[in-house]
Amino acid sequence: MQANDVRVLKSAALPTLVVGAVTVVVALLMAGGKGALGALLGTVLVGVFFSISVVAVSYASRISPQVMAMAAMGSYLVKVVVLMIVLRAFGDTTAWNPKAFAWAVVVCTIVWTAAEVRAFVKTKMLYVDPDAGKS
């Protein structure tokens, strides 16, 4: 991974962990232990899914922009399929509170996405190769 990618990953993961911890505490207060477990699982799911995407796109960017785009779309497709399988498999579970899980996923996804956008905007990356015209 490049230094910029690590910076973006940290910039998105840390606020998400903080907000995830808050969702766990709120879920604990609102729905008890099952709520806290649901919120914790939702936070972990978001963290793992988005981290995998950042790593996959980072490694693919070393090859070419086309491969990077395919990695982004492929990782998105895999995440959607895995999420559908997880939701289908645990749709009727009583081990955790599904509302707390859902709210944690939504809130953590919003925080991760906003933090990732902020990190990309603040990152000083060249969009063109300044040496490309020199021969």
Image (cartoon, rainbow, N blue to C red):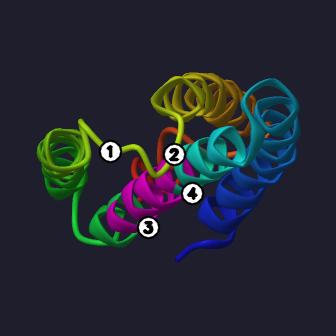
Residue at label 1? Answer: 93
**Front of the two marks 3 and 2:** 2
Rate crowding at label 1 as few (under 14), some (14 to 19) or many (20 or more) other CA atoms within 10 Å. few
Task: Give the quadrant of the C terminus.
Answer: bottom left
Residue at label 4? Answer: 44
Seen from this angle, which residue lies furthest bottom?
A: 1
Q: Secondary structure at mark 2?
A: loop
Horizontally, residue 39 falls left or right of residue 62, namely right
Q: Secondary structure at mark 3?
A: helix
Rate crowding at label 2 as few (under 14), some (14 to 19) or many (20 or more) other CA atoms within 10 Å. many
Numbered label attached to residue 96? 2
* Residue type of the residue flagged with mark 3: Val
Numbered label attached to residue 114? none
**Front of the two marks 4 and 2:** 2
Q: Pinpoint residue 112: horizontal percent, then vertical percent.
A: 64, 36
- What stretch of residues is rendered in magenta? 45-56
Dominant secondary structure, magenta: helix
In terms of sequence position, does the residue under pointer 3 or pointer 1 come before the other? 3
Quarter occupied by residue 47: bottom right
Q: Is residue 89 visible?
A: yes
In terms of sequence position, does the residue under pointer 3 or pointer 4 come before the other? 4
* Residue type of the residue flagged with mark 2: Trp
Quarter occupied by residue 118: top right
In terms of sequence position, does the residue under pointer 4 or pointer 2 come before the other? 4
Numbered label attached to residue 55? 3
**Front of the two marks 3 and 1:** 1
Horizontally, residue 135 falls left or right of residue 113, namely left
- Confirm or deny contact between disc 2 and disc 1 (CB under 8 A): yes
Q: Secondary structure at mark 1?
A: loop
Asked if residue 69 is positioned above or below residue 100 in the image, the reply reads: below
Asked if residue 29 is positioned above or below residue 67 in the image, the reply reads: above
